Image (cartoon, helix red, strand yellow):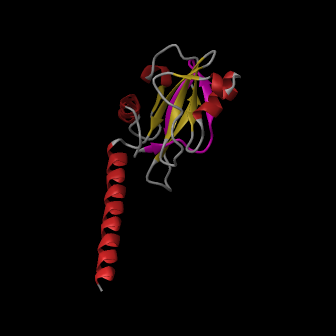
Amino acid sequence: MRRFIKYTIGAILVSACLVFALSFYGYLLWNTRLGLTDSDKAFGARLERSLLKPSDSMRVADIHPGAWSLVCIITAYESPSRVAAKVLGVSKSELKFIDSTDGLASDNLWGLAFLYPPNSVEYRQIHSSHFYAGDSTECRSQNDAALQVQDLLKTNKDMLLLIKQ
């Protein structure tokens, strides 16, 4: 009987530790907003403040000025490095990420990759409760890149499109 009690208490302690560890991991994940950097969070907040309702649009250069030549909308589960390497004509190993990383694959995260030829990329991951990026990855030059909100009646989110201005 003592042996049974000893093993039962051990199993309860191990289970409690696992539950605590998983809960703590969930808490950290939620608090860090899925691994977003401070720059990602600030960029996402600027987007949400600037694009408030369906049909709103704005030039990408107005919200993210800089020396980038192309911007690509990176959809969920797409790799910024794969898209950037293809567009810039370099291998993934030649890419240099500026103040960012290659990003996480998730259905909740998407982003914008700002390309600086010959091989630099600045990727801004976005986790928005207001809109998502849709299903197609596309790129536009700095001179004509704009973001536009499209109302989707079927969902509670609006789709953000990268359009030619």
Seen in the picture, residue 57 relative to 34 is either above or below; the reply is above
Quarter occupied by the N terminus: bottom left
15 on left or right of 131: left
Say if the magenta span includes residue 45: no
Residue 64 sits in which quadrant? Answer: top left
- From the viewer's perspective, is residue 135 above or below residue 125? below
Span of residues in magenta: 131-149
Q: Is residue 140 magenta?
A: yes
Residue at (37%, 30%) from the top-left corner?
46
Q: Residue at x 37, y 57 (%)?
A: 22
Q: Residue 9 sits in which quadrant?
A: bottom left
Q: Quadrant of the C terminus?
A: top right
Q: Nearer the viewer, residue 80 or 16?
A: 16
Residue at the image position 43 percent from the left and 42 percent from the top: 127
Q: Farthest residue in the bottom direction? A: 1
Residue at the image point whose x is 56% and y is 19% from the top:
142
When asked about the image quadrant of residue 114, the answer is top right
> Front-most of 145 and 34?
34
In the rendered image, residue 57, in percent from the top left (x then y), is placed at 47, 31
- State the image coordinates of residue 104 (x, y, percent, origin top left): 51, 41
Above or below: residue 21 compared with residue 61: below
Q: Residue furthest top?
A: 67
Left or right, 150 with reference to 86: left
Q: How many marks?
A: 0
Q: Position of residue 7 (x, y in %)?
A: 34, 75
Foreground of the two, 93 or 66:
93
